[in-house]
Amino acid sequence: MPFSKRFTLTQYLIEQRRRFPGASGNFNALVLDAALACKAIARAVAFGELGGVLGNQDADLGGAINVQGETQKKLDVLSNQYFTRLNEWAGNLAGMASEEMEDPYQIPAEHVRGKYLLVFDPLDGSSNIDVNVSVGSIFSILRAPQDVIESGRDVVEADFLQPGSKQVAAGYALYGPTTMLVLSVGNGVVGFTLDPTLGEFMLTHRDIKVPVDTQEFAINASNSRFWEAPVKRYVDECLAGKPGPRGKDFNMRWIASMVAEAHRILMRGGVFLYPRDTKDAAKPGRLRLLYEANPIGFIMEQAGGRASTGRVPMLGVKPTSLHQRIGLVFGSKNEVERIERYHTEPAEVEMSNPLFGKSSLFRD
């Protein structure tokens, strides 16, 4: 393959650091360590059954059911270990929090502690692993509270309960036909593709932008009987197509791997809905605020899209617990704003589409 003059991730971070002459370099080192964890996970995913890492984690090996009440896959546990082990040693972090761990992860005493917090979902969409559907990792970087930095004390849950607007950076890795790292350090969104011959993430997508309009939406239609009226209205209007109130046809997608959904929307537009519903009154949503909604929301907003609960901007929500769940809508700005408007001014709309009729496929 001929040599291509592209920026590596390291070179890109150095370029961005020039905007902050007083920066110490710890932030760059942290992003590179997170990227290294993603490379390690990409390799494990690529080997699949050949690597003996598919299937559920055995209970006697520290797995089975995680804090979310979900069955852990072997790759969930391995991916979590890659993130913790590769990020604990360098002196950049005060602590970590993971979707797979009930409590915050403390930096071991033998290592220096730093001024950042790392929050991550080590393997998003892992239920798709056994059927070879694209999965990914999601991470978010926050500044540790000042008293944590000054005292060096152990981190507690409250230290991580910062709104998404406080994120310093967010990114995700997508393990698909190619491995990609999509990153925002607060100055737009860029994409890197892993060059397997060099083992380097190379800058391939500069200044990614989400189109403001779209004709594509993603939602799990099997939950339609639990949707709130504004969501039912929105989906029904999309399904009505060109003859309906929207005056255009829409395509519906659903991969059940949020990283893959987010990546498709970044590349060509669309809107993703996993809204609050009535399926389980104890859960105000299905996705995790800190590990999924905030980092993906940050990336979408940096790319000119919008992220919302359906009612209020996602990045303004103040977390109340480490594993808080929430409804999430993100993607093309005009569509997300329409959904928010439907929640603000709900209209009683008769579900005329046969899919949602009284004796339909999607309703009781």
Image (tube, rainbow, N blue to C red):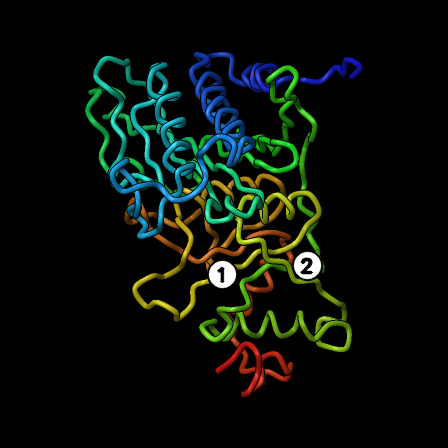
Q: Give the image location of residue 51, x and y in percent.
A: 48, 30
Identity, as a three-letter code, of the amino acid under mark 1 = Gly
In which image quadrant can residue 88 be found?
A: top left
Q: Give the image location of residue 342, x and y in percent.
A: 55, 70
Task: Give left or right: position of 191 versus 57.
Answer: right
- Which residue is most to the bottom? 358
Q: Give the image location of residue 239, x and y in percent.
A: 67, 72
Disc 1: CA contacts within 10 A as few (<14), some (14-19) or many (>=20): many
- As helix, strand or loop, the secondary structure at mark 2 comes to strand
Image quadrant containing the N terminus: top right
Identity, as a three-letter code, of the amino acid under mark 2 = Glu
**Residue 145 to residue 32: above or below:** below
In which image quadrant can residue 147 be found?
A: top left
- Which residue is most to the right? 2
Per the rendering, the mark at residue 216 is 2
Q: Which residue lies under the disc numbered 1? A: 310
Residue at x 58% of width, y 53% of height = 255
Q: Give the image location of residue 327, x and y in percent.
A: 44, 58
